[in-house]
């Protein structure tokens, strides 16, 4: 699977850990930075990643910052993207199964590396089930399309 990953300086070490984990699992990983822990404005990373996911360049993405909140807010500004913050495996699984989230965000100041790997694993192992949630996801998509149409 083609997976993008990006972070701000607060999550650089966790990004490197998860990048290796994803590569070890056999995924193709595109690193959007930050590189070498250099300070960045996290919205720039989140939006670049989300735009490429929305365009189909990557199947999914992992975004990391101190809390995961800012990355989720930023990525969700891109039409067609559903980014979900997860700090446990259940939330990660439901982000995919119920909400068809293509992007997961994790806070490096909130979870450690082992839990982060478990969160990513749960999210990657899950697929959108539609079912009871389909009407809700469809409503989000319809709203986005209506806004884009003017």
Image (cartoon, helix red, strand yellow):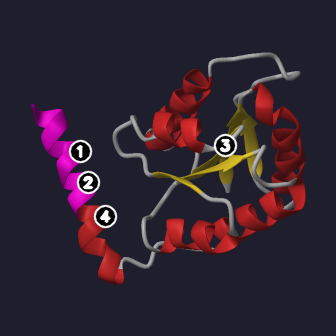
SS for callout 3: loop
> Dot 3 corresponds to which residue?
67
Q: Residue at x 16, y 37 (%)?
A: 147
| Label 4 vs 3, first from the N-terminus | 3
* First reached walking from the N terminus: tag 1 or tag 3: 3
Q: CA distance from mark 4 to mark 3?
A: 25 Å
Which residue occupies the extreme left position in the image? 150
Chain part drawn in magenta: 139-150
Q: Quadrant of residue 42?
A: top right
Mark 1: few, some, or many residues within 10 Å (few <14, many ≥20)?
A: some
SS state under label 2: helix
Near mark 4 (Cα within 10 A), the count class, few <14, some 14-19 or many ≥20, is some
Please state if 84 lies on the left or on the right of 148 as rendered: right
Gap in angstroms between the C-alphas marked 4 and 2? 6 Å
Q: How far across and how far down the image is residue 137, in percent? A: 31, 64
User: Contact, CB < 8 Å: mark 2 with mark 1?
Assistant: yes
In 3D space, how far apart are the residues under numbered discs 1 and 3 (Cα atoms)? Answer: 26 Å
Is 83 above or below relative to 118?
above
* Circle 4 residue: 137
Q: Secondary structure at mark 1?
A: helix
Residue under pointer 2:
141
Residue at coordinates 87% horizontally, 54% vertically from top-left? 113
Determine whether label 4 and label 3 are within 8 Å by CB.
no
């Amino acid at each position: 699977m083609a997976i993008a990953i990006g972070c701000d300086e607060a999550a650089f070490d966790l990004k490197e850990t998860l990048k290796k984990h994803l590569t070890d699992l056999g995924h193709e990983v595109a690193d959007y930075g930050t590189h070498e822990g250099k300070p960045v404005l996290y919205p720039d990373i989140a939006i670049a990643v989300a735009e490429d996911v929305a365009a189909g360049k990557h199947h999914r993405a992992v975004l990391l910052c101190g809390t995961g909140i800012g990355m989720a807010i930023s990525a969700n500004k891109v039409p067609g993207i559903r980014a979900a913050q997860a700090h446990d495996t259940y939330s990660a699984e439901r982000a995919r199964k119920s909400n068809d989230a293509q992007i997961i965000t994790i806070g490096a100041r909130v979870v450690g590396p082992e839990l982060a790997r478990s969160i990513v694993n749960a999210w990657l192992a899950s697929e959108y089930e539609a079912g009871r949630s389909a009407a809700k996801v469809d409503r989000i998509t319809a709203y986005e399309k209506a806004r884009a149409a003017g």
